[in-house]
Amino acid sequence: MAAASSRARIDHVVTSGTFSLDGGTWEVDNNVWIVGDDSEAIVIDAAHDADAIATALGDRRLVAIVSTHGHDDHIDAAPALAARTGAPVLLHPDDLMLWKQKHPDKGPDGELSDGQVITVAGTDLTVLHTPGHSPGAVCLHAPDLGTVFSGDTLFNGGPGATGRSFSDFPTIITSIRERLLTLPADTVVRTGHGDSTTIGGEAPHLDEWIARGH
């Protein structure tokens, strides 16, 4: 019985809300990923709806709320979920200026750094600093689960957007080429929005993305 409950699994919640930056606001659906077992879990990107995320968690202990980056649609529910569960909110410090646009009076509880390992339910997730969509964007690689949580760095069909403040297209291409496309081809890419993909499914298109410039 104990062995069955100690194997980490991936749960998925889609939440809806808005993304605002540079004076514009857009309706968005976000993927919230929950990694853990029957007793403990982490949440990757507490987006929009703390109640829905808490319902998916059930009575599990929340170890951490990991933010792949500081855009408001990925962090808007983080303080409420943290207050409800006591879990720390973690963010790469290079995105603190984005966090403060949404939560000026409450900072994250801890920092993410490249190479940092977060362990939950006996499963290691390694933080990969992948700037470009934002300066502090990170992905989380879980080799035991055959997956990488890519936030808004890599999607099914190409890189995350780089047309707004604090983003840079050559930087995101370097991040994808050097940090993500070097992962095993069968690695499942679980994205911040939309459908999942694989490293092998995206890698052949790198030159196309560079040519089109987005």
Image (tube, helix red, strand yellow):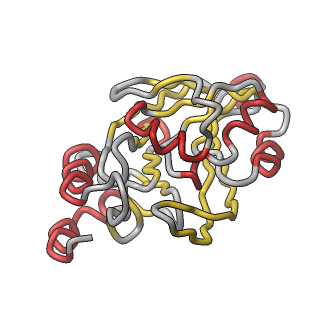
Count the labels in the image: 0
Residue drawn at 52 percent across, 69 percent down: 24
Residue drawn at 49 percent across, 60 percent down: 21
Q: Position of residue 12 (x, y in %)?
A: 66, 53
Q: Is residue 161 left or right of residue 104?
A: left
Compare residues 144 and 159 and report the one nearer the observer.
159
Q: Is residue 172 left or right of residue 65?
A: left
Q: Position of residue 19 (x, y in %)?
A: 57, 62
Give the answer, above or below, for where 203 lies relative to 82: below
Q: Quick one: quadrant of the C terminus?
A: bottom left
**Residue 87 sits in quarter:** top right
Q: Position of residue 50 (x, y in %)?
A: 76, 46
Give the answer, above or below, for where 121 lies relative to 202: above
Give the answer, above or below, for where 144 lies relative to 193: above
Residue drawn at 57 percent across, 29 percent down: 108
Q: Position of residue 73 (x, y in %)?
A: 59, 55
Compare residues 98 and 123 and report the one nearer the observer.
98
Give the answer, above or below, for where 60 lies relative to 170: above
